[in-house]
Amino acid sequence: MAIRFVTSNEGKVREAREYLADIEPIEQINYDYTEVQSDSLEEIATHGARETFEALSSDEPVIVDDTGLFIDSLEGFPGPYSAYVEDTVGVERVWRLTSEEKNKRARFRTVLAYADETGTETFEGSVAGTLVAPRGEGGFGYDPIFEYNGETLAEMDTEAKNAISHRGRALAEFAEWYGERTDD
Ligand code: ITT
Ligand code: NA
């Protein structure tokens, strides 16, 4: 059975497809679920997945991915506001804002929520790295300014990014759970 990935972000879909290729087909759908006012990625993703599954008359499960970039020197900003900040200020200026800071550490966090007729489950992944001046043509969003082990996420191909990334780790947890569940 296909899994419907509720997102407007094609980068997320590309990564999920790469990871879940042998498990289930991933169908991208756009559904404008209510973005609950919360600073919890988990709450946002859980509500989004539940609401979308209930709203669409189909048994196919849905997943929602809510991700944020948490910058140490900015007390975790932009965190749950990462999409808004990318759209308004832009990635380059986020980098410039932190380039004066001594501490350049940041962390990506992803919460993946899965919903079907039996309930909702969440899976989490995170990765710590260093903010740098933009480099690389791959990936999306904040990838060009996020360095891990000497490479920005935008310098990695999808497989390499998935092997170490927040989303890759959340997908790994999900795949393990989903596999055990569909085995019996
Ligand atoms: P949907 O809500 O439609 O899924 P979105 O892009 O708004 O798409 P998020 O709110 O989860 O998704 O994303 C928060 C921000 O973080 C947004 O600006 C993304 O571009 C960025 N982002 C998400 N995952 C990322 C990743 O793996 N690498 C770099 N930036 C990422
Ligand atoms: Na969003």
Image (tube, rainbow, N blue to C red):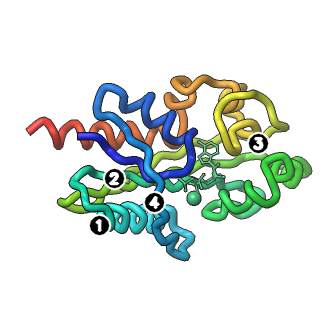
Secondary structure under tag 1 reads helix
In the image, is residue 17 above or below residue 100?
A: above
Label 3: how many Cα within 10 Å (few below 14, some 14–19, many 20+): many
Which residue is disc 4 drawn over? 31
**CB-based contact (under 8 Å), mark 1 and mark 2:** no
User: Disc 1 marks which amino acid?
Assistant: Glu
Q: Residue at x 57, y 47 (%)?
A: 9
Which of labels 3 and 1 is toward the front? 1
Q: Is residue 173 left or right of residue 29?
A: left
- Give whichever of discs 3 and 1 has the lower sequence position: 1
Q: Who's the residue at 28% across and 37% down the image?
A: 176
Q: Which residue is mark 1?
A: 54
Question: Residue 112 location, x and y as percent?
Answer: 42, 52
Residue 38 drawn at (x, y percent): 54, 74
On screen, residue 32 versus residue 84, left or right, reads: left
Q: Residues within 10 Å of mark 2 (few under 14, many from 20)?
A: many
Residue 138 seen in render: yes
Label 3 close to label 1 by CB (< 8 Å): no
Asked where in the image residue 3 lies, by quadrant, the reply is top left
Between 146 and 57, the one lying in front of the other is 57
Nearer to me, 81 or 106:
81
